[in-house]
Image (spheres, rainbow, N blue to C red):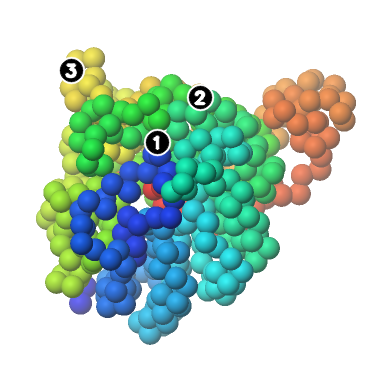
């Protein structure tokens, strides 16, 4: 039964293997969660899986339902578990309902069989890659300490061969953040990926893995670097890739300019619509708050809809805006930033108020740098035009440079490519912004809002 206060839609990130993973990535915040379930087999039972799917479907009051699988590493459950899950989805699906499965993986165990299954059942995959080999292998290694680049690239190729849609999830850390264009161009040109999600690593330095203490590890991305990373990629993207390469964060910020809010939780004023489901059936306030104080209950005792609409979860959600320091409340970019994710708020403002985001300096630089082009794209969209028209506007702003450029000269847009392969070529892809992928109600491409590693 649906409670009146249950939101019409919500997001549950299920972890069928809990924190169990076949890799040992240095920055993974989730590996330490193993300590919370000392005697566990780290396998979700079919009973919990069925309750998860049934309760999620029953509580939704819109047609689109997302069933999300994450880890740890979900492929460790074996393919048959997900075959059964798809059958359960069919069993409980209501007429007219569209159920989409999202599946985040490190790619190591993917093979033909997995890819065929994903394709047949229309799974959307999140594949973790941190850039070209020398950047990916810095922190993403296996239990023996070996780099995983070759295996993840093999997985990406298999997905492409089988025409399985995937998002690249790139964890931006202290090392790869120094090479924004190398990372971006690698994904775009060498991997051929079109959907990119950059996730800043902000890791608290403690033994629990909980959001405690204010010390940040050296592996974390430096605030100014985060800003520079986003700005350099944005500058290339806005000159040549709008409508053909999709960067989730850029889409989210643009949505705030277009209609005043984004569907990305980090860009929303409150939290609370996305919970984490552990393999035991325990539900926590958010994937980043799987810790005893944020446990809402267990789906064997209370339905997910009830837990999401609980007072405790409501208070967790409201805390995001309630605890904002004055410095943020007076910020000109509050309308889109909202202080970003509370888990990253470890700084104290100059007037000694706690709760300022570690990334603030970089975020502010990014918002200031992109304000004009964001407003231009928003204006185009509001007038029923296409955001990709901005690329031609930018070309017209520098007409002489483009007119003078020879076919083999570097493109004046600064992309680093030859003119003939960049703005000098007849573009054929630039119209897809409004018709491809999973769109939100503004008609823009805002794909799934997974933003965890
Ligand atoms: S903003 Fe952060 S804490 Fe809030 S729901 Fe999103 S990930 Fe969780
Ligand atoms: S940019 Fe900085 S000051 Fe402004 S809302 Fe974001 S975190 Fe707060």
Going from N to C along the chain, the mark reached first, 3 or 1, is 1
Q: Measured from the top left, where is residue 54 in percent x and y?
A: 30, 77
Between the residue at mark 2 and the residue at mark 3, the CA separation in whole angstroms equals 27 Å
The N terminus sits in image quarter:
bottom left
Q: Nearer the viewer, mark 3 or mark 1?
A: 1
Upstream in the sequence, badge 1 or badge 2? Answer: 1
Closer to the camera: disc 1 or disc 2?
Answer: 1
Which residue is more in the foreground, 431 or 42? 42
Disc 2: which residue: 228
Q: What is the spatial separation of the Cα atoms under label 1 and label 2, in whole angstroms? A: 15 Å
Residue, far bottom: 91
Can you name the residue that lies furthest to the front here? 144
Say few, some or many: other residues with alpha carbon within 10 Å of mark 3 (under 14 / 14 to 19 / 20 or more): few
Circle 3 SS class:
loop
Q: Between residues 167 and 247, which one lies in front from this camera angle?
A: 167
**Is residue 452 visible to the viewer in this orientation of the structure?**
yes
Per the image, the residue denoted by label 1 is 201
Cβ at disc 1 under 8 Å from ligand 1? no
Instruction: Check residue 352 in the rendering and tell me which mark sits there, or answer none.
Output: 3
Residue located 61% across and 69% down the image: 112
- The percent position of residue 353, horizontal first and vertical second, equals 18, 22
Residue 190 appears left or right of 133: right
**Sequence order check: which comes first, mark 2 or mark 3?**
2
Which label was assigned to residue 444?
none
**What residue is drawn where x is 47% and y is 43%?**
145
């Amino acid at each position: 039964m649906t409670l009146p206060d249950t939101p019409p839609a919500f997001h549950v990130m299920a972890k069928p293997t809990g924190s169990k993973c076949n890799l040992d990535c240095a920055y993974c915040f989730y590996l330490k969660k193993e300590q919370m379930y000392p005697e566990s087999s780290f396998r979700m039972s079919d009973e919990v899986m069925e309750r998860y799917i049934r309760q999620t479907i029953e509580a939704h009051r819109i047609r689109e339902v997302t069933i999300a699988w994450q880890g740890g590493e979900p492929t460790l459950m074996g393919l048959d578990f997900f075959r059964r899950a798809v059958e359960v989805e069919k069993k409980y699906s209501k007429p007219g309902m569209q159920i989409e499965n999202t599946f985040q993986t490190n790619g190591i165990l993917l093979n033909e069989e997995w890819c065929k299954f994903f394709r047949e059942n229309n799974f959307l995959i999140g594949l973790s890659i941190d850039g070209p080999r020398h950047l990916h292998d810095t922190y993403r290694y296996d239990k023996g300490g070996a780099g995983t680049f070759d295996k993840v690239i093999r997985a990406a190729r298999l997905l492409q061969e089988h025409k399985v849609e995937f998002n690249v999830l790139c964890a931006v850390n202290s090392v790869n953040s120094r090479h924004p264009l190398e990372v971006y161009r690698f994904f775009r040109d060498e991997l051929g990926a079109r959907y990119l999600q950059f996730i800043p690593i902000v890791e608290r330095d403690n033994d629990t893995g909980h959001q405690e203490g204010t010390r940040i590890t050296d592996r974390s991305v430096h605030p100014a670097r985060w800003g520079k990373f986003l700005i350099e990629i944005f500058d290339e993207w806005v000159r040549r890739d709008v409508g053909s390469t999709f960067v989730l964060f850029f889409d989210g910020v643009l949505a705030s300019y277009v209609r005043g809010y984004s569907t990305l939780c980090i860009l929303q004023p409150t939290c609370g619509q996305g919970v984490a489901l552990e393999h035991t059936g325990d539900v926590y306030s958010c994937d980043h708050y799987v810790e005893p104080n944020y446990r809402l209950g267990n789906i064997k005792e209370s339905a997910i809809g009830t837990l999401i609409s609980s007072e405790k979860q409501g208070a967790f959600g409201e805390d995001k805006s309630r605890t904002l320091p004055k410095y943020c409340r007076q910020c000109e970019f509050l309308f889109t930033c909202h202080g970003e994710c509370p888990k990253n708020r470890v700084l104290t403002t100059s007037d000694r108020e706690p709760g300022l985001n570690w990334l603030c300096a970089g975020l502010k630089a990014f918002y200031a740098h992109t304000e004009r082009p964001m407003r231009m794209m928003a204006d185009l969209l509001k007038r029923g035009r296409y955001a990709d028209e901005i690329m031609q506007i930018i070309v017209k702003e520098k007409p002489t440079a483009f007119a003078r450029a020879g076919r083999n000269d570097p493109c004046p847009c600064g992309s680093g490519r030859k003119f003939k392969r960049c703005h000098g070529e007849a573009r054929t892809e630039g119209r897809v912004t409004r018709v491809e992928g999973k769109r939100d109600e503004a008609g823009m491409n805002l794909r799934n809002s997974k933003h965890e590693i």
